[in-house]
Structure formats: structure tokens, C-alpha cells
Amino acid sequence: MMKKLLEDFKYLLHVITHPFDGFYEVRFRGKKNVYLGAIILILYGLLAIIKYQYTGFIMNNNPMFRMNSITTFLFGIFPFILFCISNWSVTAIFEGSGKFSDIFTVVTYALFPKLVLDAVIVILSNVVTKEEATILSAISAFGAVYFAFLVFAGLCVAHEYTAATNIVMIIATFVAAIIIIFLAILYITLIQKVVSFAVTFGSEFMKRW
Amino acid sequence: MKKRILSLCLLILLCFTFATAYAEHTNDSSYIYDFWGSANESLNAFELSKVISGQIEGGTEENVIQSVDDVYYHNGRLYIADAVANKVFVLDDDYKLIREIKIIRDAEGKIVVNDDNKQAILSAPEGVYANDQYIYICDTGNNRIFLLNPETYALEMEVDKPENMVGSTEFVPSKIAVDNAGRMFVVVKSSTEGIIELNTDGSFSRYFGVNSPKVSLVDVFWKSIATDEQKKQMAKTYAPAFVNVQTDSDGFVYAVTTDTASEEMVFRFNAKGENVLRKFGYSEQLGDLPSGPEDTSKSTFADVAVSDYGVYALLDTLRNRVFLYNFDGNLLTVFGGKGDIEGTFNTPTSICWHGNNLIVGDSKLASAFVFTTTDFGALVLDAEEKYFNGDFNAASALNEKIVSMNANYDHAYVSIGKNYLMRDEYKRAMEYFKLGNDKTYYSTAFGGYRNLLIQKYFPIFAIVFLAFVVWVLWTEFAYHKKQKQLEEL
């Protein structure tokens, strides 16, 4: 298990430098490792907490007295999971051949360079002045763009889509994500109403018994 | 037993002794906005010390204040304009009446008579200003300005609507301020063309100051597709009017507006009429911030008072508070409020400095309230004055005292930090900038600190760098060697 993980990690380094080739191997030649993906995602969540607290003073605009590690962690990884779910739900309808685990590995593998760059930025942000901070922001932006490129390439391969279809699907994914959030909020509100009704009913019942 | 009762009584008495030694006459708490825009508790810097109302001390039954529409202090004289009693009261430093001005007399003591055979009597004077040369009174009801001699109170000059005045603004002077060169800046109520600038001889010079209204994108869109006929029916967007004006010792003109449609509420105009208000505080000079303790509506300012060392007070008419800012735009303190108890206002109209005291005029309550500094406030103003005049070490020492009284006073930390920065004590400067949440100055201090570190550990950096270079060269060398070997094979 551990050995496999290490081996796949080594292959991950190949994947992020040769995305089309690499993701093909991951998707079709058994180089997929969901555990590795999960570890990267959890590390990314942890990095979000570290980023909140340990980014250097000059670049850090987070109110420390309002810090909540659990919400920071959840909000750090939530967008990616949401993206996976909504992409899967869209592509499952439109002849995407990727399974959920394929999408998940693509997104999390693609997150790896961003993870490394962000970690480096957190460290470097403690030794830069305000003028040099723009360089770090540029690096961070590069990480985000590279992540987007890797996800795009990975999804193309995983779903066996052409580039044009893939762009349409990614736009559809964002629409689906908004719908999912809307439904989730609706669901939570309704459940809250039901629960509060039950609680009121129960307390009333007990008082009048 | 008796002893016990006595000691118990003493204990109870002790409990009721107020621990607020810094502000003896006030139990209000003040607040201040920090870097995050949240209101933190702060010490009171001003407390009410005297109320001037009703029959003025040293006057007769006739010298009764019926409304306070403007207050101005200059050189031992406090001027109070009363638009209801149609008078201007002149008070001395102890707030005792020196004279009341109602009828204007000339140098021989005769009542001035106008061309149409009417005596020159003040009618609803709303503004008053004074410098070493003249007392300026806006006779709002009669659309004219009187310039009186400050010693004899005799008429020196009368300014009516200038012949060469252009524009659609009616000449109804409401407030007036005069700069060092004697140019008069006259505010006319609801004038959309700006402040009227008059030359020393009373002739019209120009409209001064630009006040741009907020324009929403939606309006722009509808205007762009409307026909000319439709445009005629649409409500026009006018430039918001100024309500008050003041000059500072450097010749800059401060102006405020109560119009919430205005993009900015406070102005500091240079000679070209551009707003050059310094905004280096944690937030802009908005009075209460939207994240403030109460509702989110924008503060509107009725008057501004500028001190010799750049500290200016803004009088808010929405929540009746006074906001004190320093030259850079840092909020110093807030006091006042809406209400009927001491230290609050009903309809505040005007504010002025009297030394380090602030005098606030209230028209409905027909009173002028004198606020003196508390120990804390005195320190704050002293520190600002020292800082403004370049005595940074003294300012820093005072600021140290201030933060020991009030740890929420973030701007003082920055001020101390700046002093350390100037003395190249980067490490301490960084500490204070961090406390005061000033990232720009922290960055400067950190840059200096980092340079020192690099100088100190230069050998290590050099060795690491050299090692890196050697390593790169070595790998290149090894690679080529290998390639060569491969080629030879």
C-alpha cells in the first residue's frame, strides 16, 4: 500500500509535467490512485488553515480573532468536491466516459502544483516587503492558471472529449454547481422547518399532557 | 460592631467611587474604528464643561440667545451668530459678554443707513468669521456681508451681490471663511455651482470647488437610450451643495456637505479647487462606518473646525456626533450624540476650536456647548501638535503614555513605530506597526531589518550562493562528460 502510494506519487510528478500523456496513463493504464488524491486534497485543506494564520503580516489580511480552522478547512476543500460532483453529474448525461473516481483523481492531481506553490508562497511571504509581494501574487496566479490547465487537460482525457465539448461541459459544470448549492440551501431550510415543527409540536404536546 | 458598620459603609462608598480618573465629568464611553472597521471601546477625549445659553453672563435681560447658528473663535473673542434674535454676540475667553451686534454703526457711532433709507440691521445672520483685520458677518436675510472693525465694531465694508457675478446662484450668503490673503469663500445654501470666491474688495472672482454627484450605472443606461423629449422629463442630477466652509492656516479651504448623494462628504481644496484631503487612516473620513455600532446610513456633516496643527473636527448631523481626525486622516476620537442629556445635541449647527476646547453650537437648544479635553484628550491633542510640528521624539513619548491608557488606540502605535523607524530601530518599529496594523510602514521597516540581517550574515549567504553556482557548474560538467563518453562508445 505504502509502496504503491510512493510509486504513484512519483508518477504524479510525471503527470503534472506531461498532462495529456500522464492523465491517459492514469485513466486507462491503472495508474490511478484515489488515496493519493484524497491525501493531496486533505493537505490542501490543511494548507488553507496554515495560509490563514502563517502568511506573513504584509500579505495577510485575515482577522486572526475570527479564525476558525474547521470552517477554513471545509471551505478550502469544498469547491473542489463540489466541482467533482457537478462535473460528474453533467458528464454522466452527456456521454462523458469518466467515472467519479477519474474526475476526482484529475482534480486532485491537478491541485498538486498549486499546493506546492502555495506552500512556498506562505513561507516566502514572511520574508518579502510590500513591493515584492506582487511577485508572490503573480506566482500564486500562475499556480491557479496551471491548475485550470491541468484540470482541462485531465478532463479532456478522462471523458474522451474534444476541447470544444470540454469547454461547454465545464461551463455546464459551473451552472450545475450553482443549482446544487441552491438545492442544498433549499433542502437545509426545509429540513430546519420540519425539525422546528417537530420540536414545537413535541414541547407543546408535553406541556399539555 | 460600630466599627464594622463604619467599615461596611466605607466599603460601599469605595464601590461607588468612579475609577475613570481620565475623564472626571463624563460617564460616556467613546469608541474608535480599527483596521477591520469594527468599533472598539476608547476613552473619552472631551467632556462637557460649560453651556452658554439663555441670558449670557455679563449681559442684561436683553442679551438672550435664541438660537446658535454659527460659532467662531478668533484671538480672545468668541462670536455667536443668532439667526432668530438677529444678533451676533461677542464673548471673551471666559464666555462673558463683551458686546452684541444687531445694528451696524459706522466709525462715528452713527447707524448706517442704506441707499433706500433703511437702517442696517442684521436679519437672520447665519455665519460669522473673524481675523485680525475684520469681523465678517453673513447677513443672510438681507443678502449681504458686513465687514466690521474687530476693535470698534464699526462698519468697514459692506459686500452686496457683486456686479460681475455670473451663474444662476442667488447671492444669499450663509457661511463665510477667509484665507490669509483676504479672499472670501462664501457658501450659499443649495448652490449647485460651488463656493463663491470673492476678492478682497468684494468683487466676484469665481466659483470654487467641485463636488461630483454619485451617478448609478442604471441611470447612465436609461439616459443613453432616452430620447431628447424623455430626457427633459427626467430628474436632473445636480452637483451636491456645500453647507459649510472653513480655512486652515496653510490657506487650504475645508468644506463639508450634508447631501448624501455626494460622492465625498469632506473636502480640503487647494488653490485650484481640487480635493486634496489626506486619506491615510484605517478608513476614509466618513464619520461612522457602515459596519458601525448602529445603522448603516452615511454620516452627513454640517460644519468643520480646523486647528492650527491640522486636527479637524467634523460635526455629524445624522447621529449628532463629533468626529476628530488628524492631518493624515486618522480618527482620533468621537463624542456627542443625539439626545436631551448633557453632552448630547439636538440640532447641531456649528463647531469651532477655542484653544484645545471645542465649542459646538445647537440651534434648537439655543446653546453653545463648551467641551474641554480630558487628560487623555489633552495627551492626544498634544501628541498630534508635537507630531505636526516635527517634534517626533516628544510625540512618541506622549503616544507611549496614550497607549498605556488606552490599548485600543491603534493609530498611536503607528505613530510610535514611525519614530523608531526614523531612528532606524527597525525591530521595535516592526513591533509597533504590527500592533497598529500598518502594513505599508511595516513593509518599510521590515525591508530595513532584512537588509541589516543580510549584511550581518553575508558570508553565509555568499557561501550558499557560491555552493549553488558550483553545483550547477558541476552538474553541467558531469552531464557533458557523460555525453562525451556515450558518443565515444
Image: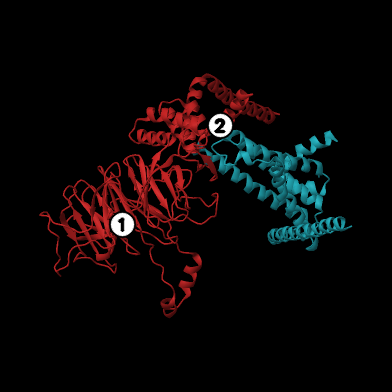
Chain colours: A cyan, B red
> Where is residue B125 shown, x and y percent of the image?
28, 59
- Looking at numbered disc 1 in the image, what kind of residue is underneath it? Asp
Looking at the image, which residue is at 20% across and 58% down?
Answer: B146
Q: Is residue B177 visible?
A: no
> Do the residues at pointers 2 and 1 share their chain?
yes
Q: What residue is at 42 percent from the left and 27 percent from the top?
A: B397
What's the amino acid at mark 2?
Answer: Leu
Q: Residue at x 18, y 53 (%)?
A: B148
Viewer-nearest of discs 2 and 1: 2
User: In what quadrant of the picture does the C terminus of chain B appear?
Assistant: top right
* Rendered location of residue A166, percent (x, y): 71, 59
State which tag comes first along the sequence, 2 or 1.
Answer: 2
Position of residue B263 in the picture relative to residue B36 (left or right)? left
Q: Nearer the viewer, residue B193 or B147?
A: B147
Name the subunit of mark 2: B
The residue sitting at 29% across, 56% down in the picture is B127
How many marks on residues?
A: 2
Q: Dividing the picture into quarters, in which one does residue B82 lie?
A: bottom left
Residue that carries the numbered disc 1 in the rendered image: B82
The x and y percentages for residue B232 are 41, 77
Depth check, front residue: B28 or A192: B28
Q: Chain of mark 1?
A: B
Give the side of residue A135 with respect to residue B373, left or right. Answer: right
In-image side of B249 versus A182 (left or right): left
Residue B317 makes an appearance in the image: yes
Secondary structure at badge 2 equals helix
Extreme residue toward the right, this view: A209
Q: Position of residue B286 (x, y in %)?
A: 46, 51
Q: Residues within 10 Å of mark 1 (few under 14, many from 20)?
A: many
Residue linked to disc 2: B13
Q: State the quadrant of the N terminus of chain B.
A: top right
